Each structure stands twice: as C-alpha cells, then as structure tokens.
Image: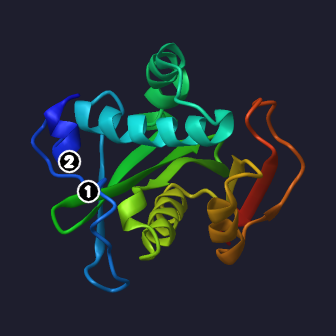
Amino acid sequence: MDPRKSIGISSHGTRFDSSPRRRYARGMSSTTFASIDPRDPLALSVLTSYFTEVADRWEGASADPAWLQQTLNGPEVALLQGTGGDLVIARRGESIVGCGGVRWIDYDTAELTAVYTFPSARGAGIGTDIVTELERRARLTGRHTVRLDTREDLVEARALYAGLGYAPVPAFNTDPYAQIWLAKSLA
C-alpha cells in the first residue's frame, strides 16, 4: 500500500483527509476552491477517490482498475478545463475535502459532474458549498441552466440536489449509470 494514501498525503505533498476519525463541523472554516487541470496528479488522486466510491457502491465490489484508468484518461475528465468546463478542488484550511466539475454543454447550459466530498468531511455543508461554487462559475459564463444526472442509490446526492432546487427533467443522455436527470434555472 502507498504510505502517502494511508496518511492522507497526495503525491504533491498536499494533505487530504480521508480518515473517518476527523469530522468537519458546519461553520468550522470556510470552504475554498481552486481550479485544477484534470491531468494534474492531485486532481487524479481526488478523482480516483470519487470514481472508486461511486463504482464500489454501484457494483458492490472494488472498482475495476482498467475501468478506473479508462475513465480517468477519458474525454469526459479531460474536458473539465478551458472551453470544455472546469474542475475545482475544495479545501477547508489546508485539507482537501472534495471536488466538483462543471461541463459547458452549450452557451446556455452547464452540467455538473464528479461532485464529491470525502467521507470524513460529510455532513458539514461541503457538498452544498461545492455545488454553489459550480453554479457561480456557470453564472459567470452567462449560462442560465445547470443540469446533472445521478443514480437512485446515491441518496445523499439526491437529497443535496433537491435541497438546492434541482427538479426532475427528461433524460438528456444515455449514460448507463444515469437513472435520474435533474436541472435548475440560474435565472
């Protein structure tokens, strides 16, 4: 096992807290965000945590390493920068606590993806902070609608989105993992 992962240090030496022992209290400190190249080793480390958890919950077993590499190197991740979108890393203090991506679908529509909070940081409002930041970035580009897809088993995510005003819409993709499609007006 990579000792950096067991103590929560990325390959860049940045601390991230994946330990179940540390809990973040609401209001303890503000969440800050920074855009990051999705090919950056730090971004890949956080995205690996996200995709591994999502796959583990879907399959009920460990994520297939070949699928994980294909996903991390695929176009949907690569386009989370520049004219394709934005990937942000969320921090509380010096700890990385999550991430989120937004794709620029067209001049009016943005799509959220890879919204993730490390398990140790859940329940502290970080997911809300991440979605709010991604919506803010979409507004700054002049987009009026934000959409996303999710799965039935991701009940925490569904509750988060409902609480933020996302409503069901007809399916807008054929992603085999998508079961629920939601959207929100930014107007």
Q: Relative to the observer, which residue lies in front, 17 or 128?
A: 17
The answer to whether residue 37 shows anywhere in this view is no
Taking the image as shown, residue 143 lies to the left or right of residue 8, namely right
Label drawn at residue 172: none
Q: Is residue 22 visible?
A: yes
Q: State the quadrant of the N terminus.
A: top left
Percent position of residue 66, x then y: 49, 13
Which of these two is toward me, 149 or 63?
A: 63
Q: Amino acid at mark 1?
A: Asp
Q: Which residue, as the protein is rendered here, is positioned at the far right?
A: 170
Label whose residue precedes the other's in the sequence (2 or 1): 2
**Residue 68: where, in percent of width, then height?**
49, 23
Please give the name of the residue rendered at 25% of the width and 80% of the height, measured from the top-left corner. 29
Q: Residue at x 63, y 60 (%)?
A: 157
Name the residue beneath numbered marker 1: 17
Residue 159 drawn above or below residue 70: below
Q: Is residue 87 left or right of residue 143?
A: left
Measuring 52% from the left and 23% from the top, which residue is drawn there?
Answer: 71
Q: How many residues crowd around disc 1 within 10 Å: few (fewer than 14), some, or many (20 or more)?
A: many
In the image, farthest residue toward the bottom: 27
Left or right: where 42 falls relative to 132:
left
Check if mark 2's residue and mark 1's residue have beta carbons within 8 Å: yes
Way the structure is coloured? rainbow
Q: Indicate the position of residue 42 as horizontal and vertical percent values.
A: 25, 38
Between the C-alphas of marks 2 and 1, the distance is 6 Å
To which residue does mark 2 refer? 8
Q: Is 46 positioned to the left or the right of 40 in the image?
A: right
Q: Amino acid at mark 2?
A: Gly
Secondary structure of residue under mark 1? loop
